[in-house]
Image (tube, rainbow, N blue to C red):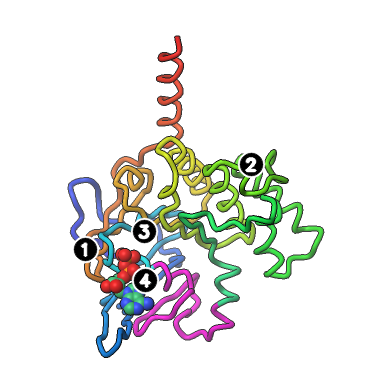
């Protein structure tokens, strides 16, 4: 069951459409950091589920616990206490190597700064997670090209990051996040380095992937960007203080069409 905390006038509390196993199930998840002799309670008992096909915006002020939460659900770190199950797998009990394996197979990461390797082409960057996962050579090229195709970047396969715009680099990074068929894509401020039009283009890609059934969690500071998501979870002081579904999910393709028509009117 998802928690529905303080459902707001903007939307309804999230209710799973069926009893399907959640992709993410966290219960009383806590994370403490030791800073000198002080304990920092970065997460204070977060409980929520994310079901297959959801598109969640994680919001909250700086220091509210968003990164800590994403690090835990991305299998980059382990909780101090509480339950975390990814696709029904009890992740909190895994050791470092097992955690790395689960991360590689089940989680696709997208970062604010794209994090592409500069010496590799788009195709090389997108191929890397498959090479780490031991995907047989002939399949690597085929799947990497299919992922680049899915983000509209097939014609840039042999370009290096420096030869691509920010938006193209982020699309390559999304393709890289996709190639191992993850259970979830975690995107940390994916539009933070992009201008507003390019941000909408990136959200259009994420919405298109979500329509194909891919589950996505996005950290964002921007209320505009959260409107493209189906659900908004807000953190404060290590707790979830708000969790609602957007009544209307803004459609990035419509916004792009509007921008195009305004541009053609301006030039007429
Ligand atoms: P956000 O991503 O919302 O900015 P964080 O999850 O980064 O929030 O941080 C939550 C709290 O935990 C903050 O008080 C932060 O200073 C603290 N914190 C985060 N990482 C560490 C760490 N490695 N060591 C000590 N304190 C940390």
Mark positioned earlier in the residue sequence (3 or 1) = 3
Residue 243 in which image quadrant: bottom left
Residue highlighted by disc 1: 241
Mark 2: few/some/many CA within 10 Å (<14, 14-19, 20+):
some
Residue highlighted by disc 3: 16
**Residue nearest the viewer, comparing 159 with 153:** 159
Inter-mark Cα distance, 3 to 4? 25 Å
Mark 4 within 8 Å of ligand 1, using the beta carbon? yes
Mark 3: few/some/many CA within 10 Å (<14, 14-19, 20+):
some
Question: Which mark is drawn over residue 68?
Answer: 4
Query: Does residue 29 appear in the picture of this structure?
Result: no
- Residue 8 at what x, y percent from top left? 19, 51
Residue 44 in which image quadrant: bottom left
Quadrant of the rendering where the N terminus is positioned: bottom left
- Residue 182 at what x, y percent from top left? 57, 62
* Magenta-highlighted residues: 70-99
Circle 3/circle 2 CB separation < 8 Å: no
- Furthest toward the top, the residue is 268
Residue at 68% in and 56% down: 119
Mark positioned earlier in the residue sequence (3 or 4) = 3
Q: Is residue 166 magenta?
A: no
SS for dot 2: loop
Residue highlighted by disc 2: 153
């Amino acid at each position: 069951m998802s928690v529905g905390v303080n459902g707001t006038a903007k939307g309804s509390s999230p209710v799973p459409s069926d009893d399907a196993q959640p992709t993410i199930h966290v219960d009383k998840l806590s994370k403490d950091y030791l800073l000198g002799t002080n304990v920092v309670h970065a997460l204070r008992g977060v409980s929520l589920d994310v079901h297959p096909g959801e598109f969640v915006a994680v919001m909250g002020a700086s220091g509210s616990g968003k990164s800590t939460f994403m690090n835990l659900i991305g299998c980059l770190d382990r909780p101090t206490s509480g339950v975390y199950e990814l696709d029904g797998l009890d992740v909190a009990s895994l050791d470092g190597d097992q955690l790395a394996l689960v991360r590689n197979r089940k989680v696709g990461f997208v970062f604010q700064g794209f994090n592409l390797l500069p010496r590799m082409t788009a195709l090389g960057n997108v191929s890397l997670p498959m090479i780490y996962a031991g995907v047989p050579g002939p399949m690597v090229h085929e799947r990497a090209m299919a992922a680049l195709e899915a983000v509209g970047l097939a014609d840039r396969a042999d370009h290096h990051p420096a030869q691509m715009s920010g938006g193209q680099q982020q699309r390559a990074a999304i393709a890289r996040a996709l190639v191992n068929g993850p259970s979830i894509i975690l995107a940390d401020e994916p539009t933070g380095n992009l201008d507003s039009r390019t941000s909408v283009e990136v959200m259009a890609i994420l919405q298109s992937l979500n329509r194909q059934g891919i589950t996505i969690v996005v950290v964002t500071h921007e209320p505009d960007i959260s409107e493209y998501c189906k659900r908004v979870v807000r953190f404060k002081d290590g707790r979830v203080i708000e969790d609602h579904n957007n009544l209307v999910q803004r459609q990035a393709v419509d916004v792009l069409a509007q921008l195009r028509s305004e541009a053609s009117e301006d030039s007429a």
